[in-house]
Each structure stands twice: as structure tokens, then as C-alpha cells.
Amino acid sequence: MNSVTASAPGKVILAGEHFVVKGEPAVALAVNLRVYVTVKEGRENITIKSNYLKNKVTLSLYNLGNTKSKIGKVVATILKSLTKDGDIPPLDIVINSEIPPRYGMGSSAALSVALIKALSEYLGLKLNREEVNEIAYKAEEVVHGTPSGIDNTVSTYGGIIVFRRGEGFIRLNADTSSVGLVAAYSGTFKDTKELVIRAKTLSDKYPRVFDPLYHAAGRLALEVAKALKEGNFHAVGELMNVNQGLLSALGVSSLQLERLVYRFREVGAFGAKLTGAGGGGCVIALVPKEALNRVMEAVRPYTNWVKELKVSYEGVRLEVSRG
Ligand code: MEV
């Protein structure tokens, strides 16, 4: 096989990020921004190019793990999972991402999922989604330390899911056609690993305070799932606002995020909250369809990136395979 392209979607978390790391349920949906990965025959090494990387990363076939680059480490982990020692051919890997990194929209998980799909097809392995998801989790561990698995799962399977660490996920059938979902960038970002440690450190320090908050966040995610199914977006928005308060209590919000959250609410969103690891990254807002343009215009002065998102019902997929 000479060239294979695969893609996978990014995600937003509607309820339950961070709390999901300690086993509470969370609700996530795949979005219509994708990462495309092409794998081609290389010359002597593994080379990685990306529209979000200044320089090409090169990995030696004989010492794959010997790299400081995060993306290089992810590629090495994935290649080792897919091949037997010494069985790795020279490859050129080209990444084209529509998901800006560190926006809280699952760019790293989507990259891993798409890369595993492209590589496995290139190597003639027929992996099912479950196997792709399992390997993507290992790659996420390289980037995040102790991921819950929600990002790689929603990117692999697509759609709207209720996820629980250790238990897996269920699909949520909800008609979202009458509501708008908007994301806006806060202008700053933080490392996911650092934020997960921050939330864990604070909650471990005061278990009597935080145990009930974790429990509440889990109940909240289930209420969000129920309201989504019923098409009660007013309730979903209200619960997103409560979720933002809990995330703020956990220490993962920021002044820039709060400004955006309050602006969205002020101009007519049903609800708004940070999404993903927080500390920066994006705010998501649920907006009545008829108010969508007005709300987006009203938040524009507060952000340099605002976008309407749609649910992507397709998870990982093979794009092109030329042999
Ligand atoms: C990151 O998108 C979501 C977090 O809950 C981390 C995780 O679940 O692995 C912050």
C-alpha cells in the first residue's frame, strides 16, 4: 500500500470533564472539525509533518522512543503497539488538522485515533473500532498521564455519548437540530496534564468538601443526558451553568474563560461553560437557533476565534487508500 488517509473528529464535553477522571459519568459529543492523517512510504526514517508544527519531526527506526517531541512520542507509542520489534518500515506521516491544539477540543485524541486507523490500514492490519480506541488510550496516556478515555472514545465512535471510566459508554439519541452550539477561544491555554493534576491535588486535599461535589457533577451529567434526550435545551443550558460553577470550584477556570461565559449568558445563551481541561482553551455555549447570529456577533469582541459547531455522527473513518 503506497498511501492511506484516515480522519477522526474532535470533541466538546457538555458536562463532567475532570470529574470523569475519578469515575463520574460525563457527556461528550464529536464535532465537525477533524484531523486528517496520511501515511506514505518513507525513505529511511519516520518523518512527521503537521500544519500545526513549525518543523518536521524525524524518528529513527532503530530508536523510535528517542525523541523530545510530544507528537514524536505519540507516534512511537502507536507504532510500537501496531508492529513487532524491528518490523517498522520507513514512513512519511502528514497531519492536517482542523482542530487548533489546546482549545480543549480533543485534538490530540483525534490525531491518535486517525493515525492508528491510517497506520493499521497501511500495515494491512484490520483493526476494529474497539482496538483503535484501546491503542488511542495508550497514546493519550503519553500526553495526559491519567486520561479518563473520554476523548479517544468519542473521537473513535462519533455522535453524542455518556461515558464512564472503566464502564465504557452509551450512545445518546438526541435531536439537536433546533439548537446552536458555539465555541469561542479564551485567548490562553494550559497543559491538560497540569490541569488534571491541579484538580486532583485540590480535591484529594479536601475530600469531605469535594466528594459531594464530584457526586453532584456525576448526577448533573446524567440530568444533562436526560434533558438532551427530551430536547429540553433550556435545562441543558441551566445545568451547563451549574457545571461551570463546579469546575470553577475545582480551580480549572480562568478570568478570560469567566468573561466569555458571562458574555454568552448575558446575550441570550441557554448556558455556557469551559470545555475540556480548562485553565484556558474554549468556552462552549448552547444557543437558541434563532439567536445564533446575534449571539456570535455579540461575543466576537471578546475572542479571536468563535465558531458554530455541529455534531459529527461519524467517528474515525478511512478517507483514501491508494495501493
Ligand atoms: C479533557 O478533554 C477532559 C479531562 O476530563 C481529562 C480526561 O478526562 O482525560 C480534563
Image: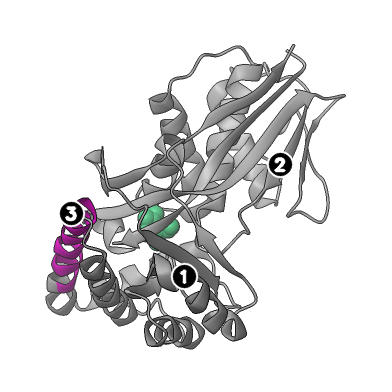
Ligand 1, seen in the image, is in the quarter at bottom left
Front-most of residues 90 and 283: 283
Residue drawn 54% across and 29% down? 317
Placement of 240 over or under 21, stated as above or below: below
Considering the numbered disc 2 on the image, is that residue within a helix, a strand or a loop?
strand
Considering the numbered disc 1 on the image, is that residue within a helix, a strand or a loop?
helix
Task: Identify the image quadrant of residue 199.
Answer: bottom left
The residue wearing badge 3 is 230
Mark 2, mark 3: which one is toward the viewer? 3
The image quadrant where one finds the C terminus is top right
| Residue count near mark 3 (Cα–Cα under 10 Å), binned few <14, some 14–19, many ≥20 | some
Placement of 25 over or under 289, stated as above or below: above
Magenta span: 213-229
- Give the number of the disc on residue 292: 1
Q: Is residue 211 magenta?
A: no
Q: Residue furthest right?
A: 43
Q: Is residue 217 magenta?
A: yes
- Give the number of the disc on residue 76: none
